[in-house]
Amino acid sequence: MVADGVERRSFAEELAVEAGQVALSYREQGDMEVRSKGVLDWVTEADLATERLIRRRISKSFPHDKVLGEEEGYLGSQADEGRSTWVVDPIDGTTCFVSGLPSWCVSIACVDETGHAFLGVVHNPPGAETFSALDGHGFTVNGHKTLIPNRGLTDGLVGVGHPRGAPDEPTLSFLARLFAAGGLFYNSGSAALSLAYVAAGRLVGFYESDLRAWDALAGEVLVRESGGWSTDFVHDGSLTTTKPVLAANRGSTAALQDVFGGSSARS
Ligand code: IPD
Ligand code: CA
Ligand code: CA
């Protein structure tokens, strides 16, 4: 982990809140421009303005770092060694954002020069909640450490997202096995927020078959630091490929891995 992790965590928490205010201000204006990138794939003025703000703040405070954001891609050469990379989704859950649902967030992660994601912050403006974690420093909600309940697969809901444009089979197969194991699903419409809810013990797990680094990384750090288990998005050293993401509360880990193992084996 980079030496100034604590400083980066405070920076990312403040930045996520500021970015969330920018996004909210567009929502409250009510007449923002919305463009479709594909079926249920929106980009709004708010996504673009929020990512621009995040990039400006990072460039000013950490000028030697790289930034990978959903809307504008890489800042800094991917070949540059020895620099941390900020991975940013300015609004995760844009369909909810556009629809007036409260389930969206700003997601900010930081990856060190070895490719290890060590910092994750997810901020949900409508709920005024900031979920934050730094390697070895635990998980907090609005700055407070919380006791995470140890819940089994059938004690709560499993977040399941379905990526637009990806094959249906892995999701359908996972759901069939989840139902067979007695589990039920919940789709928040935001992968990053669902992972934060796993970390906070509100969901017992999360699965989506095909996610991007900016959807998954911050949430994976949150889950790990809360004592849960998650896949490691950068296990193959790549921040740019899409991958399945699975995460679970401690008490559900074995059961959910079993559900996932069976469904991925069949897909
Ligand atoms: C999406 C959300 C959604 C998930 C999609 C993502 P976006 O991100 O996380 O929950 O199912 O796969 O692409 O487009 O709202 O940033
Ligand atoms: Ca996203
Ligand atoms: Ca987004």
Image: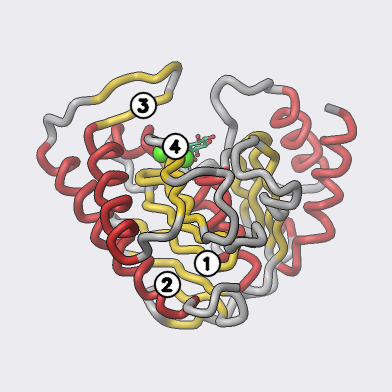
Which residue was labeled with disc 2?
A: 8
* Numbered label attached to residue 119: 1
Mark 3 vs mark 1, CA separation in Å: 27 Å
Residue 103 position in % (x across, y down): 38, 47
Disc 1 marks which amino acid? Leu
Q: Please, what secondary structure does the residue beneath circle 1 have?
A: strand
Mark 2 vs mark 1, CA separation in Å: 8 Å
Residue 186 versus residue 32 in the image, above or below: below
Q: Identify the residue shown where x is 36% and y is 26%.
A: 42
Disc 2 marks which amino acid? Arg
C-beta proximity under 8 Å, tags 2 and 1: yes
Q: Which of the marked residues, 2 or 3, is nearer the chain's N terminus?
A: 2
**Which of label 3 and label 1 is nearer to you?**
1
Task: Give whichever of 55, 208 is nearer the camera.
Answer: 55
> Would residue 214 be found to the left or right of residue 247 on screen?
left
Q: Identify the residue shown where x is 13% and y is 35%.
A: 30
Residue 57 position in % (x across, y down): 28, 59
C-beta proximity under 8 Å, tags 4 and 3: no
Q: Circle 2: is it few (<14), some (14-19), or many (20+) Cα within 10 Å?
A: some
Which residue was labeled with disc 4?
A: 73
Residue 178 position in % (x across, y down): 76, 42
Disc 4 marks which amino acid? Gly
Q: Which of the marked residues, 4 or 2, is nearer the chain's N terminus?
A: 2
Mark 4 vs mark 3, CA separation in Å: 16 Å
Quarter of the figure with residue 58? bottom left
Q: Circle 4: is it few (<14), some (14-19), or many (20+) Cα within 10 Å?
A: few
**Which of label 2 and label 3 is nearer to you?**
2
Which residue was labeled with disc 3?
A: 42
**Which of label 4 and label 1 is nearer to you?**
4
